[in-house]
Amino acid sequence: MSSDTTRATDTTDSAAFWENHYAGVDPQWGTRPNAVLAEAVTALAPAPGGRALDLGCGHGGDALWLASLGWDVTAVDVSATALERVAAGAAAAGLADRVHPGRHDLARSFPDGAFDLVTASYFHTPVEIPREQVLRRAAEAVAPGGLLVLVEHASLAPWSWRDGHEDVTFPSPDEVLASLRLGDGWRTERCHAPERTATGPGGETATVTDNVIAVRRAHQD
C-alpha cells in the first residue's frame, strides 16, 4: 500500500480540528459507503475501474467501497488518525493494494495526476479554507471522460458538529455547480437536492437534505 499518514509538525487549524474530531469518534463510524454517493456512482459509472480520488475520506467508507468494486483509490484527508484507520480497514478487507491513503491539507496541497472518478462527500469544515478553489481543483483533476461527484449537506442533522449554529446556510445545487466554473466540455449528470433518512452515530434518525452534483468531462477528440 502506498501510504502517507505521517503527522505533520506544522499542524494547521484544519488538521488540529479534524484530529480532535476523529480522536473522539468511534473508529467504526463512517466505515460504510455514503448511500447517496453509492447510488450516483453505481448509476453513472456502471463499469468500475481506473483511478479514483476520494477527498476528505474520513474513516474511508467510500474509499473502501470503491476499491471493493475494482477502483484504484487515492484516499485523502488532513487527519493522520483518520488515514491510519483507513489503512487498517483496507488491510483487514484485503484491499491494501487498491487503497492509497495520502495526507493533504487541501488548502495547501493536492494529489498529483488525473483521475477517472473524483468524489467528495460532505466536504464541509468550520475552519476557513478556500472551499470553492479546492472544488475547482478537484474538477481539474478529472480525466477526459471521467466523473466528478459531490455530495454535500443542504441541511443540518441533529448530531452535526455544526448543530446549534443558527447562521449556517448552504448553497443550492445550482450555486455549487456554478461555483465550479466548468466552462465547455462538461455534461451535467445530476444537480438536485433530494431528501433522505439519515442515521447518526448513536443510532438516531432524522430527515436531511443533500446537494448532489455529478458532472462528466468530455472525451478528447
Image: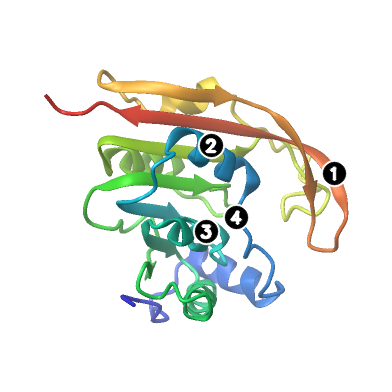
**Colour mode?**
rainbow
Residue picked out by circle 4 = 33
Q: Position of residue 129 (x, y in %)?
A: 46, 49
Q: Is residue 95 left or right of residue 200?
A: left
On screen, residue 94 above or below 215: below
Q: CA distance from mark 4 to mark 2?
A: 12 Å
| Residue occupying the point 35% across, 76% down | 3
Label 4 or label 1, whichever comes before in sequence order? 4
| Residue occupying the point 57% across, 52% down | 125
Q: Residues within 10 Å of mark 4 (few under 14, many from 20)?
A: some
User: Circle 4 sits in a helix, a strand or a loop, which is it?
Assistant: loop
Q: Amino acid at mark 4?
A: Pro
Q: Depth check: give the residue in front, 218 or 213.
A: 218
Picture quadrant of residue 103: bottom left
Image mark for residue 126: none
Residue picked out by circle 2 = 40
